[in-house]
Image (spheres, helix red, strand yellow):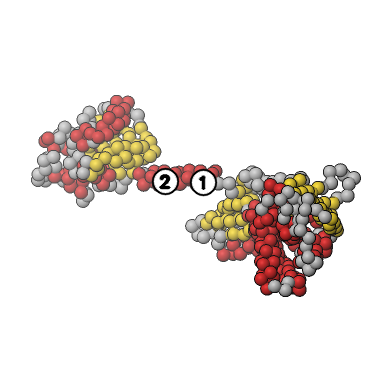
Amino acid sequence: MATGPNTASWPSGNGEVAGLIRDCSWDSSPLGPPQTWTPSLRTTVDLMLAAEAQIVLFCGPDFVALYNDAYAPTIGDKHPRALGRPARENWAELWDDLEPLLSGVLTTGETFSARDRPFYIERSGGVGETVYFDVSYSAVRAQDGSVEAVLCIVSETTARVLAAARLRESEQRFRALVKASSDVIYRMSPDWQEMHELDGRGFLPAVEGPMIRWRDAHLFPEDIPSVQAAIDRAIEERSVFELEHRVRRADGGVGWTLSRAIPILDDDGAILEWFGMAADVTARRASEQHIQLLMREVNHRVKNQYAVILSMIRETAKRANDPRLFEHQIRERIMALSRSHDLLVVNDWRGAGMSDLVREHLKPFAHEERVELSGPDLTLRLNAVQNIGMALHELGTNATKYGALSADRGTVRVSWRVPTDAEEPREFELVWEERTSRAAEPPEDEPHLGFGSVVLQRVVPTSLSGSASLERQPGFVRWTLSAPLDNVVVDEAGRLDDLVEDEARA
């Protein structure tokens, strides 16, 4: 607008906008010079300029804008050109939104107000943005009662609205994370005396309202002191509570949880409540226990293997005059132990299948087509795998040298059985039977009459608390092993218990 010297003293005041009004040349403004303004309008302008609130006055049918210093920053580079000009000229980008509000007050005289009202405005360099205001638009009436202007008191709330939106978004993400998590969610009072809420996720019993006796419901009496000690430390230090401990599961069983809770503090640092999450680590604890048990078992088995190997060396050395023969026999017997060991490793030290054990130990002797296996599908205990494996190696060696596998048409039949009738003795029976039309006769000093016989008739049955018999006739050999079923076969329903028993027995 055009400005120039003006000696009028109205409006008074040292503010920027008051000076602009005094110095403004109003001839080009639809409002005309201030001397022609109604007393009520001039009084309203005086009140507006003196106010610290953000106020803009839209005057007459053209909604000519007048505003105070507090309002000027809210319109950016529209100031000062918007002063004394019709609103349409400077608020074109939001005129379709603003004009109905102003016209409604101008025509009806009714006040319009809103909180966090969005407006799209270009405040700097023609760049538009959506901003938010608390607004109150009210009528300014002339002496005759007609509405001559709309007084707009505004307060920008953009920062608050955006902060609230970010908070809502954060809460939504957090709730989505909590919902997606399989962990138990819980809330505690500042002193942990009252559980406010617990979403058990099927792992722990849910708590929907305050619970005082939550320790009795979720913990075991012997564990309460250690849990309480960790709680006391966290409260005293205002730090994170974190502990792995036992809990009563929703199904009544015993579980393990890794529980972690953080204190929610007020501005003064006082604890308002605790928010926590608890993971079900029952399976991991069981796995770690099983691994520890396996490691102890491996340790026992290695020591046992050492003892067996030393016995092999001692007994074989007594009967071997040829160093090369001694080396060959020791190597083959150690390899047999290794085959049993490999089967146990493959099966995670949970035992080995009877048929797998037979095939593995007879594989080095070839002639698989002449070996017949017969027996139910069952899993042997660790101790039985090692001992029966040694027996199979000795039998296979003898059969290859002198028995059924040394002749062209000999056959070997390996069969095993377990009781199928409740009235039968609970015994496992293994029979090795070989037949051939002709076979070589072993010399009297052959090893199978020494260490092999010791293995078949004494070592294996004694280790399994059973008995064995060996029958030899021309063209026929039968070795029979009988032992208590529980010493040989794994109970499929309790393999971990079987491992413990085997370890103790070893």
Screen quadrant of the N terminus? top left
Q: Residue at x 21, y 37 (%)?
A: 90
Q: Amino acid at mark 1?
A: Leu
Q: Which residue is mark 1?
A: 177
Q: In the picture provided, is 497 more to the left or to the right than 23?
A: right
Residue 17 in view (yes/no)? yes
Q: Nearer the viewer, residue 182 or 273?
A: 182
Q: Secondary structure at mark 1?
A: helix
Q: In the picture provided, is 156 more to the left or to the right than 202?
A: left
Give the farthest residue toward the top. 107
Q: Position of residue 52 (x, y in %)?
A: 30, 47
What's the CA distance linking mark 1 and mark 2?
16 Å
Mark 1 vs 2, N-terminal side: 2
Q: In the picture provided, is 483 more to the left or to the right than 338?
A: right
Q: Position of residue 171 (x, y in %)?
A: 48, 45
Q: Position of residue 12 (x, y in %)?
A: 20, 47
**Compared with residue 381, is residue 135 higher up or lower down, i.e. above or below?**
above
Mark 1, Cα crowd under 10 Å, few <14 / some 14-19 / many 20+, is few
**Compared with residue 89, is residue 474 higher up or lower down, i.e. above or below?**
below
- Where on the picture, by quarter, is residue 123? top left
Tag of residue 166:
2
Screen quadrant of the C terminus? bottom right
Q: Amino acid at mark 2?
A: Arg
Q: Residue at x 76, y 73 (%)?
A: 318
**Compared with residue 449, is residue 120 higher up or lower down, i.e. above or below?**
above
Q: Position of residue 4 (x, y in %)?
A: 9, 44
Q: Nearer the viewer, residue 139 or 168?
A: 168
Q: Secondary structure at mark 2?
A: helix
Q: Residue at x 19, y 34 (%)?
A: 89
Is mark 1 in CB contact (under 8 Å) with mark 2? no
Q: Nearer the viewer, residue 416 or 181?
A: 416
- Where on the picture, by quarter, is residue 80? top left
